[in-house]
Amino acid sequence: MRKFLLSLFILSFLACKEEPNYIQEQFTGYWEIVNASRNGKITNTMSGAWIKIKGNEMMDNFFTSEVKYPFTIEGNSLIHLCEPKRIYNVKYVDQDSMVLSTKHLKYSFDFNLKKIAQ
């Protein structure tokens, strides 16, 4: 019984993942999509697409037609407060690259982005 409880405790500890603590400055910049997939398949329709984030505003040239809207960060989500709001799951971000996923209509998208400018 002790071994079972110890194993259960260890598994519970390993299963707990701490939510990432992203800050707004990590996302600031002009990001260009270097490759994208739609429903798990590489797509070229996002060629030339970009996201710009400055202050508390975000805009893109693919979902929101270059109109600025505010955004927030909650856990591992970057939430673009356009209409309808768009929730991006942040899979990875560092000083010059970012990986996001989102759903649009009936499609799942994954974006690999490269920071072009601050």
Image: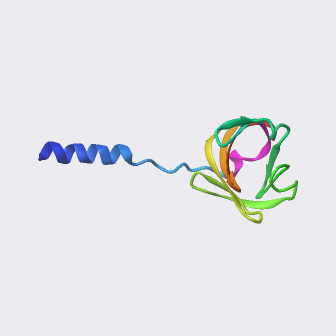
Residue under the image location 76 percent in, 58 percent down = 56
Q: Position of residue 13 (x, y in %)?
A: 33, 46
The image shows residue 91, relative to residue 76, as above or below, that is above
The image shows a total of numbered marks equal to: 0
**Can you tell which quarter of the image residue 69 is in?**
bottom right
Residue 95 seen by the camera: no
Q: Of all residues shown, which one is farthest toward the left?
A: 1
Residue under the image location 15 percent in, 42 percent down = 3
**Can you tell which quarter of the image residue 58 is in?**
bottom right
Q: Position of residue 57 (x, y in %)?
A: 79, 57
Residue under the image location 79 percent in, 44 percent down = 29
Per the rendered image, the range of residues in magenta is 24-33
For the rendered model, the colour scheme is rainbow
Q: Of all residues shown, which one is farthest toward the right?
A: 66
In magenta stretch: residue 3 = no
Residue 83 seen by the camera: yes
Q: Position of residue 16 (x, y in %)?
A: 39, 49
Comparing 61 with 39, the one in front is 39
